[in-house]
Amino acid sequence: MKIRNILASALVVGSLMASTAFAETVVKVTLIDKMGTPDLSKPLGLGMGMKADMSTAKMGININPKTAAPGNVRFDVTNLASNLVHEVLIAQITDENQLLPFDQGRNKVDEEAVRSLGSVSEIDPNKTASLTLDLKPGKYLLYCNVAGHYMAGMWTVIEIK
Amino acid sequence: MFRSAIAIVLGAVATSWVGLPLDRSFRDQMVPVQMASDAGRTIYVSVYEVTIDSWRKCYQEKACAHAPPVSALRKSAPVTGVNWFDVQDYIAWAKSRSGLKLRLPTLAEWRELDRSLAKPKPEPLFKDPRLAWAANYGQEDTPGGPVRAIGSFSTTPDGISDLDGNVWEWTSTCYKSELNDKDCPAYVASGAHEAAMSVFVGNPASGGCATGTPPTYLGFRLVADR
Amino acid sequence: MSTLNRYNSVVLSRRNLLVATAATAAAVAAVALSTEQAHADDAQTDLSKLPRVKQKLVAPPFLPEHEQVVTSGPKIVEVTLTIEEKKVVIDNEGTEIWAFAYDGSVPGPMIVVHEGDYVELTLKNLPTNLMEHNIDFHASTGALGGGALTKVLPGEEVVLRWKAIKPGVFVYHCAPGDVMIPYHVVHGMNGAVMVLPRDGLKDDKGNPLKYDLAYYIGEQDFYIPRETDGSFKKYESAGEDLSDSLDVMRTLIPSHVVFNGKVGALTGENAMKAKVGDHVLFIHGQSNRDSRPHIIGGHGDYVWETGKFGNPPEVGLETWFIRGGSAGAALYKFRQPGIYAYVNHNLIEAVLLGATAHIKVDGTWNDDLMMQVSKPGPMKA
């Protein structure tokens, strides 16, 4: 009688865990690139925390929804650029006003210093690729680290709560 | 101890006999309206059409088989897509939960409630009797668009809301008056205009050929006799 | 006219030979004629001497002001199209799409010129837009219809001039490249051009045909993705629906087929109007998918089904065929008052998907054409 109870409760707990594992939020990520074939030799100063006028940015990332529940989050990333290949890296941040460690010479975010939880790379124009991550509550930065793109405005923050 | 035992037994008997306590919310959402016809009789009329939230309660208590539709609105919305039989299920449940004599309004009652909303009769497009088929084109001023929250349309001086909305309401009047208490295949639904709706239909098709727009959505509201 | 025998070779009989000779002579003459024609088209006009006219484009179903017959010479017609990515509602249930709209309308406005005129287009892509766009004019010649020369990023504009060498009604649409070509077209990015013969329209016998009114009906097929519960998806910004849309587009089954951008856009208050005696030209464009227009209660007196005025119109048609990727034109003189429906006569598409327009016609009823001899009443034994 007792063993049966234990097995039964284990089954219930197991099925509950399994059901939460399959629950997934989908976030649509659209990569905007209005630059065509740009000259990005110098950083354009439109990164996170730089208090720049983001309305002048010609690259960007749109996300829908802007917040998601903790757990499995699937990012469906579509590249709307007409010419350039783009990518998305995801890193946890503490504060939207913080400046990211930046390699001026390479015109890229310092990927050694900013640990990414996952990435979707080399997305051709008009193509879509997906990435699923198990995210805990907090703020996360999505950004493209092709040279010059982050500073051109190609980043956004999603809040998991 | 003996007394408490009797109290427990009596309490158990009382609860099982009466069932759950009566739901006062039905009565709270109705207003009295004096009918000019029928010797000034007063009936109670629901301020709003039956909502998805209320329908969901019926569904959860397994008295209604039709699953409530999903609403993207944050506020309460009228339930739609319900056919005649669904409506009868709900009314049976609502009567037992409220203890009131709830029913659908008759077409005559509905018309009277609606009379207070001023509706100027437009000039017909064509006066020639040979063009009677085209005379009322475009004049059925039916609000389109998606289902809106309750209270989105006009309120009559009596306090009844949304009679002029885009949800048509079932009445208990058969399209053929001689079949009123018998096996009626279609009852009149009223809204921006009146339409005979088959008892099986919950979702009248929209769009159409030349003239005459069917109801956008089908819902209902309740009345109660004194 | 040669005859082919079982061996698939031309049998030369005396009759055939005569016919063949005549045919050759005609062919030689035709080649000579076409060479002349080609030279006329290729003639290097001194464009600086041509008059310039600004054409004010208007929202469909109306056409810009124009003459049907022109007596003066060719001119350069200047037009501007501004591309706007905007969220529009396409039916009465609140279904939305991020449309890519030339001059903010689906379809884009109609341009009207005459054979031999030049169209000089300034194409602008608003800086608030998110994508690159361009334009392909089916009436033009070269560079992918102008598509290769008109690619503009948001915030840019370009000027293209093309010569209208072929008379007829033609569609134009966006064609950025790869999957974006169908994606943009089914997001409303198309319109039409009418190139009238300089001496106006003619019937099958060469007599002049005039229209009192003209309407441009742009038919649009939409492929809106659905949620798992069947409701239509909504998106926050243009382009967000790309991968979902491509999945629906691949089924080749539209969720909506509409006139003028929305279910019911040309009905009720916005129904087309005419009166008995009016000759009305209905121009029907479909940049992607076949259609078969029919005037319920009327006919096509003169129909250029393929839309090209170099061909004599067909007469007295019931329903005509608009092949996807083209425009056609039909001229009808209304003879009875009342309400007419103008539909894509796949009636599932007309009623369930939205491809219906209405025409309100004033005038006096003609009992000779139709009369209700007796009213409906109980059947006689």
Image (cartoon, coloured by chain):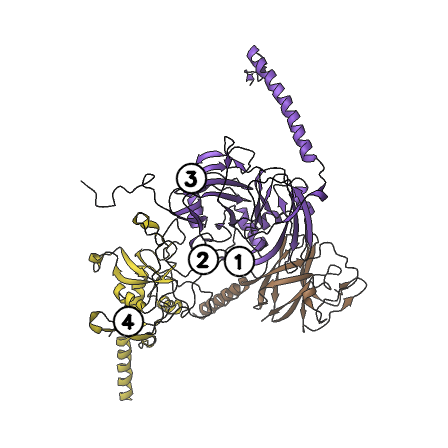
Chain colours: A brown, B yellow, C purple
Foreground tag (1 vs 3): 3
Residue shown at 54%/48% (left/top)?
C63
**Which residue is identified by label 2?**
C92
Q: Nearer the viewer, residue C172 or A140?
A: C172
Contact, CB < 8 Å: mark 2 with mark 3? Answer: no
Mark 2 to mark 4 CA distance (whole Å):
38 Å
- Secondary structure of the residue carrying numbered label 4: helix
- Secondary structure of the residue carrying numbered label 2: loop
Mark 1 to mark 3 CA distance (whole Å):
33 Å
Mark 4 to mark 3 CA distance (whole Å):
61 Å
Instruction: Measuring from the top left, give residue C253's x and y in whole percent.
Output: 50, 47
Mark 2 to mark 3 CA distance (whole Å):
30 Å
Q: Residue furthest front?
A: C71
Q: Residues within 10 Å of mark 4 (few under 14, many from 20)?
A: some
**Which residue is identified by label 3?**
C299
Pick whichever of labels 2 and 3 is earlier in the sequence: 2
Foreground tag (4 vs 3): 3
Q: Chain of mark 1?
A: C
Same chain under badges 1 and 4? The reply is: no
Q: Amino acid at mark 4?
A: Ser
**Which residue is identified by label 1?**
C88
Q: Chain of mark 4?
A: B
- Secondary structure of the residue carrying numbered label 1: strand
Foreground tag (1 vs 4): 1
**Which residue is identified by label 4?**
B96
Q: Amino acid at mark 3?
A: His
Foreground tag (2 vs 3): 3
Q: Tell me the quadrant of the picture where the C terminus of chain A can be found.
A: bottom right
Residue shown at 31%/70% (left/top)?
B94
